[in-house]
Image (spheres, helix red, strand yellow):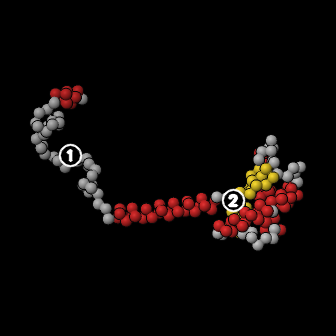
Amino acid sequence: MADPARARKIADRIKVIVAEYLEFRLKDERLGFVTITDARVTGDLQQASVFYTVFGSNEDRQATAEVLEANKGRIRSAVGKGIGIRLTPSIEFIADALPEGAAHLEDLVAQTRARDEELARAAANAKPAGDPDPYRKPVDRSEDEGDDGVDVGDQAGDGTVDAEVDADVDAR
């Protein structure tokens, strides 16, 4: 098992070599606008997975996949010369699902934005249910200098004073 840092370096080098090979050395009309997005190498450095995306229609993607599969040996040979290790890893090309995932996320963001705008329009014309100011405000006793006839210990408001409240007031 190779060092994970070495495996990452080799994967990065494979990514660059494959991208340069596709851009400068592979001449095929069927090859679409290809971007090499990632490369991963197994721990024993025997297999490499190269991820790619193709800009264009489904036919362009299919044609590019056929070109990559047909030229896999030549690309592997270029990788072997470029990385200079004892055993050249076998190469597997995998179409990256990144654009489809990004398009799906963009659709979700657009739906969320539309729903937020709809809620904002509904909230603009909304009025609160109940009182306009539902919060209780403390009673300012300084304004009420006169006695309203209710004793401090009169919790029920019926003029009777609870004995427990009177006991608490006397204890203070």
Given the image, on which type of amino acid does mark 2 rest? Answer: Ala
Q: Look at the image and tell me in which quarter the N terminus lies.
A: top right
Within the image, what quadrant is residue 165 found in? top left
Q: Is residue 92 left or right of residue 156?
A: right
Residue under label 1, please give it: 141
Identified at 76% across, 72% down, the residue is: 29
* Dot 1 or dot 2, earlier in sequence: 2
Q: Nearer the viewer, mark 1 or mark 2?
A: 2
Identified at 82% across, 51% down, the residue is: 89
Q: Position of residue 133 (x, y in %)?
A: 27, 55
Q: Look at the image and tell me in which quarter the C terminus lies.
A: top left
Within the image, what quadrant is residue 36 found in? bottom right
Identified at 43% across, 62% down, the residue is: 115
Provide the secondary structure element on which disc 2 rests: strand
Callout 2 environment at 10 Å: few (<14), some (14 to 19), or many (20+)?
A: some
Residue under label 2, please give it: 95
Given the image, on which type of amino acid does mark 1 rest? Answer: Arg
Question: Could you tell me if residue 20 is visible in this image?
Answer: no
Question: Could you tell me if residue 149 is visible in this image?
Answer: yes
Marks 1 and 2 sit apart, C-alpha to C-alpha, by: 76 Å
Q: Nearer the viewer, residue 47 or 82?
A: 47
